[in-house]
Amino acid sequence: MTVVHSAPKIASNDGVQETLTGALDDMVMASSEEHGEIIITVTRDRIEDALRLLRDDHDYQQLMEIAGADYPDRAERFEVVYMLLSLTKNHRIMVKVNAAESTPVPTVTTIWPVAGWLEREVFDMYGVIFAGNPDLRRILTDYGFEGHPFRKDFPLTGYVELRYSEEDKRVVYEPVQLAQDLRSFDFMSPWEGADYILPGDEKAEEGDA
């Protein structure tokens, strides 16, 4: 079998946490290994420096994803998580920063241009601001959307709903209204008022006979 690259099939975490935290030095706030993943939390203002060092000096060439998490009880309620992959080592790590609604996170589009789209998604879903992102607009929700859907305090029904108004000849936004009344189930069939015998119901009639 021809080996086309030198990356191991299974990459070990042995020594990785110590090596990377030592290299990042005073940028590191915390580090751990959880569920087989190396997780390093760095100072928010140094995230660009930290990721550049990991890319250039430790071969984590690819930014695979940027994700958000919301912990409303914390003073800095948001976590921004950067998932990095080393192609040459076949190894992944996660780097985190903490942020509040009023504390922007520096963009990393200067390192990976694809981060522009990923940061827009976190901005849209959580409201995290990325300072320096050249095009920080919503990317998944609609124009005029209110709020950020992945925040824990965002209502399940949202704040507004939209529809096309024939009268106004445009899309209009209105307060959410749950128009469908609760069905009155008869506990015999899943649909109220069915005028036909549902599959299986005929057996009950045979038993009565």
Image (tube, helix red, strand yellow):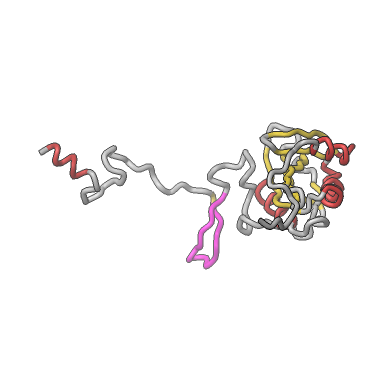
Q: Where residue 159 sits in the image (x, y, percent)? A: 57, 47
Q: Quadrant of residue 139?
A: bottom right
In the image shown, does 6 or 128 lie closer to the viewer? 6
The N terminus lies in quadrant: bottom right
Q: Quadrant of residue 201?
A: top left
Q: Where residue 189 sits in the image (x, y, percent)? A: 28, 43
The residue sitting at 83% across, 35% down in the picture is 18
Q: Where residue 73 sits in the image (x, y, percent)? A: 69, 32
In the image shown, does 27 or 132 lie closer to the viewer? 27
Q: Indicate yes or no whether the magenta region holds residue 169.
A: yes
The secondary structure that dominates the magenta segment is strand
Outermost residue to the front: 1
The residue sitting at 13% across, 37% down in the picture is 208
The residue sitting at 54% across, 65% down in the picture is 170
Position of residue 22 relative to residue 164, above or below, is above
Q: Indicate yes or no whether the magenta region holds residue 165.
A: yes
Q: Quadrant of residue 37?
A: top right
What is the magenta range?
160-174
Q: Is residue 85 visible?
A: no
Outermost residue to the bottom: 169
